[in-house]
Amino acid sequence: MPLIPVLLLLFAVILVNGWTDAPNAIATAVAAEALSFPAAVSLAALCNLLGVVCTLNISDAVARTLWSMADFGSHSLTALSAALAATVLWAVFAWRFGVPTSESHALISGLAGAALGLGAERLRLGAILWVLFGLILSLVLGFTLGRLFRRLLPEKGTGFYRRSQVVGAALTAFFHGAQDGQKFLGVLALIFALDSHSFALPPWAGWVCAAVMALGTLLGGRRIIDTVGRKMVLLTPHSGFAADLGCAGALLLCTLWGLPVSTTHAKAAAILGAGADPNKRVAGSLGAAWLLTFPACGFLAFFLVKCLLV
């Protein structure tokens, strides 16, 4: 498999991630009418870009964790092509129906499925377990911090918290860039480690990844904002700001610990923790979509690897 098509596939995944994952960062601010949709999307794009670039200068722990998940050997480009194609197909399918599934889950399961397509020995169990621990922890942290902030934040006027949600949206978008940007940089490291088998990134990697993600964010994602910000739970400006802080806190901790987690996962959990009267049907459909992501993307990547190796 030539290098250029694999890079193009990776950039397509990053673009789709900005398009379908980043809207979660601004969902509560748009739902509370703290920001108009165009203004919120522009803010998220800028903060996503800054999150990728700034965090990479401090720590690349999340990228290294993802890079260590599998050893694809001489079939690296083929396996990565299969994993990335599975991620794109699943993300577009989810966007079509307005379901905020996680591209992090899709990418992780795609990489695992592609590795299994080459042989179970290609998977590195320790790294896989660390990643799965992070995905569970992000749920617990998001929900707990969302509820905690709702209780700790003082009761103030609606206008105060509506303005505060602009800050909350910026923080969440920044840490979305920090988290998801590093995941894709981990994939880039897999692409460029074909000969050395060591973690290394070209100097342009962070900026290109950040720019493509920001461009994807500018494409929007209004359906997902409606699902997360309006349909899943009843949010006031007060509880919406608590959810933003809860999500940002969960993403910050997981990024510092080198855990690749789902921004969608963390934000939805924080909203459920901070909100009242959750819509069980919508929350249940989101949970089912997340659970379905692992076998669906894993099998699709496994199938594509087998086809490409024929």
Image (spheres, rainbow, N blue to C red):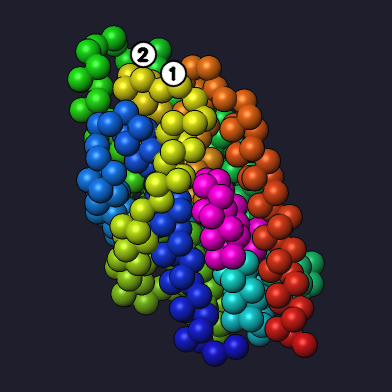
Q: Which mark is residue 103?
A: none
Q: Residue at x 64, y 37 (%)?
A: 285
At label 2, counting other C-alpha atoms closer than 10 Å, the crowd grade (few under 14, some 14-19, many 20 or more) is few
Determine the residue located farthest toward the bottom in the rendered image: 2
At label 1, counting other C-alpha atoms closer than 10 Å, the crowd grade (few under 14, some 14-19, many 20 or more) is some
Q: Work out whether residue 142 or residue 133 is closer to the camera in this orientation and state it.
A: 142
Eyeballing the image, is 186 above or below 160? below
User: In what quadrant of the picture does the C terminus appear?
Assistant: bottom right
Q: Residue at x 49, y 66 (%)?
A: 13
| Residue 165 included in the magenta stretch of the image | no
Pointer 2 residue = 152
Eyeballing the image, is 228 above or below 119? above
| 206 displayed left or right of 78 | left
Q: Which residues are magenta?
A: 87-110
Which percent across, then down, holds residue 101?
56, 48
Label 2 secondary element: helix
Q: Residue at x 29, y 49 (%)?
A: 41
Q: Work out whether residue 2 or residue 45 is closer to the camera in this orientation and state it.
A: 45
| 58 displayed left or right of 67 | left
Which percent across, then down, holds residue 12?
46, 70
User: In what quadrant of the picture does the N terminus appear?
Assistant: bottom right
Eyeballing the image, is 251 above or below 158? below
Q: For the residue marked with disc 1, what is the amino acid? A: Leu
